[in-house]
Image (cartoon, rainbow, N blue to C red):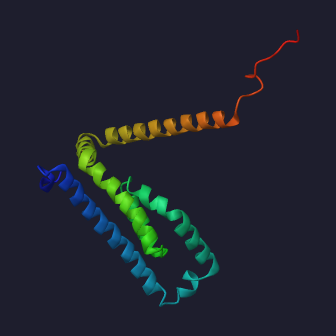
Amino acid sequence: MPSWFDGLPFGIAVAALFVIVLLRAQGTYWIGRGVVAGALRTRLADKLTGPRTTRAIGLLNKWGPPVVTVSFLTVGFQTVVNAAAGLTRMPWLRYTIAMVIGCVMWAFIYATIGFAAFDAAVALAAHSPWLLAAVLLLIVAVIVAIVLVRRRRRSASAAGPSAQDAPTRRPV
């Protein structure tokens, strides 16, 4: 855990982490926007404004905000998503609303268990990188198993009762 974080009241720690991640995310977004603005002044402009690219950007702008929000639950992927939002010129307000929700989640996670989990992973990696890989693989396997079980249950309940489950009546 960073030394500046020790002893801070929880609310101040969350607020500080929120500001840090908000500035980082907005900076990454605007760097992406700047790259596109520069590229539009080059020979790449035709490729960036063509019908296929415009359609792809439209889809990302439509479905991108939930991806932006969820990306804050990942490590590393959030930077790519924030840059992609800028590169695709996602409207600033739409991006910012999704980003703020993600920033709040990120700040609460890191203010509670995030740094402890990170410190534990670093200590485990120092002891045995293979053990860390095994633990991460086990966590992923458990998550995948939970998701698959829930999907099966949902699809089974959506299918409704089968003919075998229906009560049978005998003529009297």
Q: Residue at x 55, y 73 (%)?
A: 57
Which residue is farthest top?
Answer: 172
Task: Give the residue displayed 15% in from the left and 50% down from the top.
Answer: 9
The percent position of residue 108, horizontal first and vertical second, equals 29, 51
Is 118 rendered above or below residue 55?
above
For the C terminus, give its image quadrant: top right
Query: In the displayed structure, does residue 18 sit left or right of residue 53?
Result: left
Q: Is residue 160 left or right of residue 143?
A: right
The quadrant holding residue 117 is top left
Q: Is residue 23 visible?
A: yes
Whether residue 80 appears in this view of the structure is no
Q: Quadrant of residue 165?
A: top right
Which residue sits at x=34%, y=53%? Answer: 105
The image shows residue 37 at horizontal and vertical percentages of 44, 85
Give residue 114's position: percent from left, percent from top: 28, 48
* Front residue (pair 11, 26): 11
- Vertical comparison of 93 with 137: above or below: below
Residue 14, horizontal then vertical, whole percent: 24, 54
Count of labels in the image: 0
Residue at left offset 65%, top offset 33%? 156
